[in-house]
Image: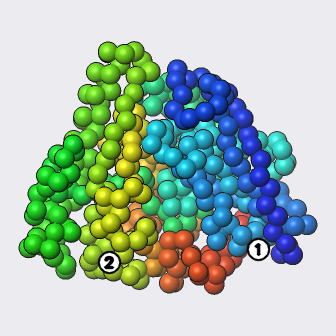
């Protein structure tokens, strides 16, 4: 059943946290405010709500949200309290935000069923949330700060839909990092043999298997160097200034993935020489690149290849609910290997994969593709009796 008009309802949820220090600007210490938006078809009741979230938020106006509502699905977008700024973001706290939004939605609107929606970076967040809601194990962050997921009472979802999702923020960043940067304080000091954007580099597309193996190993090595430095620096800062001590820093060069220049690497229908943020060479050193501005704690929680606990494959293996995985064949951010890795990792036997031909990451200017993805979701819901 389809509604005649889409209604958007904005509201806020407030909950209390026990934290030794604030990690976002403004507001009373200990009080967390999250923004939510419900997107529903007018006059169409539902006992089921499709809840989306993303670590840095801001997806309530993605084309797919209205398309889902047009199929009769109730949609809720829960922004974390890091909305629009992930510099100090702690992934474990994002679970508390999402959990508060889900609990409130059940109490406020009376929903019986919650289906988690994981769009892009929201995919690993959804899987991390479900894992900890089912069997909570964590009471500290990777930096050792207390975060009581064991006692938070997170409510598990009845199902998960991953859409244009990547494996995790930490893995994605690592696969995009510029390994030619040899000095984090001087990004002009580079290894020319690893500089994708140096026209004098003898390694040019199409890249050899040996080059790609060397390049990927160097990316992981750079991530680990930053992680080791962040651990040592945080310990030194805490020793000098107390348990709440922190420090910000810049990570240069975070959009240097051979995929964007060589369409044979993780091939799909994307346009070579571009990425979802535009020209990858510009993005690599520009202000909108992943992890450009960080704190020591945030690096460990969301960007560290070894320390971050939000990892779609690892979390997905522990999920105990049906999962639908939707990939986009022209995705210029989350390429096919990410879709495949997530699907293969899901531990629940009831899992389905669907690929939308020609669809880009955001479905921008693609109403037919976004409508098709929404219909697949609606059919998947109906098959399981969620109304």
- Which part of the image, by quadrant, shows the C terminus? bottom right
The residue nearer to you, when weighing 137 against 373, is 373
Q: Is residue 259 above or below residue 139?
A: below
How many numbered badges does the structure rendering display? 2
Q: Residue at x 50, y 71 (%)?
A: 361
Q: Considering the numbered disc 1 on the image, is that residue within a helix, a strand or a loop?
A: loop
Residue appearing at x 82%, y 42% in the figure: 107
**Residue 268, x across and y down, in percent:** 39, 80
Relative to 123, is 275 on the left or the right?
Answer: left
Which color scheme did the rendering employ for the protein? rainbow
Q: Position of residue 192 (x, y in %)?
A: 10, 62
Quadrant placement of the N terminus: bottom right
The residue sitting at 32% across, 15% down in the picture is: 240
Q: Which residue is mark 2?
A: 273
Q: Is residue 324 left or right of residue 197?
A: right
* Residue 245 drawn at (x, y percent): 40, 22
Label at residue 71: 1
Q: Nearer the viewer, residue 124 or 370?
A: 370
Give the quarter of the image for residue 235: top left
Give the answer, above or below, for where 342 lies relative to 143: below
- Name the element at disc 2: loop
Q: Quadrant of residue 253?
A: bottom left
Is residue 380 visible in the rendered image? The answer is: no
Is 248 located above or below residue 146 in the figure? below
Nearest to N terminus: mark 1 or mark 2: 1
Mark 1 crowd level (few <14, some 14–19, many ≥20, 10 Å Cα): many
Q: CA distance from mark 1 to mark 2?
A: 36 Å
Callout 1 touching callout 2 (CB < 8 Å): no
Mark 1 vs mark 2: give the one in front. Answer: 2
């Amino acid at each position: 059943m389809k509604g005649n008009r889409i209604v958007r309802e904005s509201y806020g949820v407030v909950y209390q946290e026990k934290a030794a220090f604030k990690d976002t600007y403004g507001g009373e210490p200990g009080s967390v405010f999250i923004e939510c938006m419900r997107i529903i078809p007018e006059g169409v009741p539902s006992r089921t709500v499709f809840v989306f979230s993303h670590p840095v938020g801001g997806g309530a106006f993605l084309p797919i949200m209205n398309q889902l509502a047009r199929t009769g699905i109730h949609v809720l977008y829960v922004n974390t309290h890091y909305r629009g700024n992930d510099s100090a973001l702690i992934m474990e706290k994002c679970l508390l935000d999402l959990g508060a939004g889900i609990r409130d939605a059940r109490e406020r609107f009376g929903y019986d069923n919650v289906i988690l929606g994981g769009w892009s970076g929201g995919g690993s967040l959804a899987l991390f949330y479900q894992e900890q809601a089912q069997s909570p194990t964590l009471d500290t962050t990777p930096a050792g700060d207390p975060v009581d997921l064991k006692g938070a009472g997170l409510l598990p979802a009845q199902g998960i839909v991953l859409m244009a999702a990547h494996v995790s923020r930490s893995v994605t960043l690592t696969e995009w990092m510029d390994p030619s940067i040899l000095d984090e304080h001087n990004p002009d000091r580079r290894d020319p043999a690893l500089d994708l954007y140096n026209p004098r580099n003898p390694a040019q597309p199409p890249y050899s298997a040996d080059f790609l193996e060397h390049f990927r190993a160097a990316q992981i090595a750079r991530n680990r160097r930053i992680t080791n430095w962040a651990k040592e620096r945080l310990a030194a800062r805490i020793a000098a200034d107390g348990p709440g001590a922190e420090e910000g820093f810049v990570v240069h060069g975070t959009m240097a993935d051979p995929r964007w220049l060589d369409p044979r690497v993780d091939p799909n229908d994307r346009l070579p020489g571009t990425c979802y943020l535009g020209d990858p060479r510009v993005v690599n050193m520009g202000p909108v690149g992943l992890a450009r501005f960080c704190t020591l704690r945030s690096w460990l929680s969301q960007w560290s290849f070894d320390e971050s606990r939000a990892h779609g494959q690892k979390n997905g293996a522990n999920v105990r609910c049906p999962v639908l995985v939707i990939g986009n064949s022209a995705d210029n951010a989350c390429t096919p290997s990410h879709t495949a890795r997530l699907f293969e990792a899901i531990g629940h036997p009831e899992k389905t994969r669907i690929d939308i031909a020609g669809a880009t990451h955001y479905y921008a200017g693609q109403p037919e593709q976004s409508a098709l993805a929404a219909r697949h979701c609606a059919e998947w819901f109906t098959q399981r009796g969620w109304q």
